[in-house]
Image: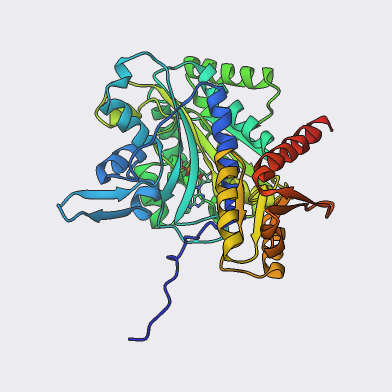
Amino acid sequence: MANRSLRAPKGTFDLLPPHSEAVLAVREAMGEQVRLAGYGYIETPAFEDTALFVRGVGASTDVVTKEMYSFTSKGGDELTLRPEGTASVMRAVLEAGLANGPLPLKLWYSGSFYRYERPQAGRYRHFSQVGAEALGSNDPALDAELIITAVDIYRSLGLRQVRLLLNSLGDGTDRPAYRDALVTFLDALDLDEATRARARINPLRVLDDKRESVQQQLVDAPLMPDFLSSPNREHYDTVRMLLADAGVSWEEAPRLVRGLDYYTRTAFEFVHDGLGAQSAIGGGGRYDGLAESLGGPSVPAVGWALGVDRTLLAMQAEDVVMAGAASVDVFAVPIGAAAARKAFAIVLELRRAGVRADLAVDGRGLKGAMKAADRSGAALTVVIGDRDLEQQQAQVKTMSTGDQIAVPLDRVVDDVLTALSRAASGGNKQ
Ligand code: AMP
């Protein structure tokens, strides 16, 4: 067989420098804001028992019916690569007995998720999310806190064109009446058999149908907000009051149902209009019944997941430039083997002093090595030529000005450290 070159699987991609730095920076910005709000970091396995997602995410959802990477392990276990994070977080919390401890529990995660979707711009089979969950409380302050934290994340990343869509989906007290009204309404429509079958499992899902032919028929559909019980309306009102107090604006989205079945009461989505069809850059809501559907006690909770990949696409769409961090501060250019040994030692000493430093390798000549120094983005280059070595000195070149001074080898590290800290404090003054 011909030796076919191996490629990343369909719907996946590699993150390579320098773009990968922007991905890290986005994840870090997300983590920073949730930590400010007191969320602790949680990590769960990339695969779980398939039953967790079937029970947790819901049997009528696209995620469970079409998109799961499920497999039988060599030991006969039915496992699935996680398509989302909330069910795993709840499983971990119940398993560790944390729901019996001090509440609310505030947790955040960052990781890879897997869905067998039709790949297109912004929709991948392997993607990255940062999520935050507040478990063990009914307080609408937590719904508001999470929404505002996400808004602050997008702001801190420089995004201006993010819209917040907000709805309340009710719960076991008021949704059955709404469901009946919706079923009666849907029964009278001209829908294909597949859609009818979906409606029988979860009629709310039909509201989420993207086809124009279906949406046209839904113009007069009954809407959940008109059916909310008074406690649920009060909850929703408080969320909106706290958002308004925080200066956050939103759009009422009475048809927003979200793609996962566990949501109750508050549901929200962040959309960006620069992204085409895959406009959702994050979303979440309350999931007060999830713990019980996993066989646990009642643990009311609320959370969100933000798509890291789509957030970056949104930043590109808005031309937001992440400060492109140079890869190193200092680059050493040794000419010849003896100089290479000395440069290696200097670079190590700089790294141990906390300076990002690198050096030319492969015995590169001066011209090639200086090109590498340029590419590295280093502020300073330490050149050690043959004559320098004889004279026990190095040339320290300031890349921005081209100024170059000879420095005794045993003072290079100290001089470089001084020059860098001078440049840093000079930068701060501006
Ligand atoms: P969900 O778990 O479906 O609520 O998704 C939360 C966020 O994750 C979405 O708003 C997207 O930004 C992102 N996301 C979900 N599925 C994908 C995917 N297949 N590819 C890229 N991003 C995704």
Quadrant of the image occupied by residue 184: top left
**Which residue lies at the image location 35% right of the left edge and 27% below the top edge?**
289
Placement of 58 over or under 334, stated as above or below: above
Q: Nearer the viewer, residue 265 or 49?
A: 49
- Asked if one can make out residue 279 in the rendered structure from this viewpoint, the answer is no
Q: Position of residue 251 (x, y in %)?
A: 65, 33
**Which residue lies at the image location 58% right of the left edge and 18% below the top edge?**
237
- Horizontally, is 384 left or right of 99 in the view? right
Q: Position of residue 352 (x, y in %)?
A: 55, 40
Q: Nearer the viewer, residue 31 or 295?
A: 31
- Horizontally, is 398 left or right of 304 in the view? right
- Asked if one can make out residue 208 in the rendered structure from this viewpoint, the answer is yes
Quadrant of the image occupied by residue 247: top right
Placement of 218 over or under 248, stated as above or below: below
Placement of 355 over or under 18, stated as above or below: above
Q: Nearer the viewer, residue 323 or 26?
A: 323
Q: Position of residue 42 (x, y in %)?
A: 40, 32
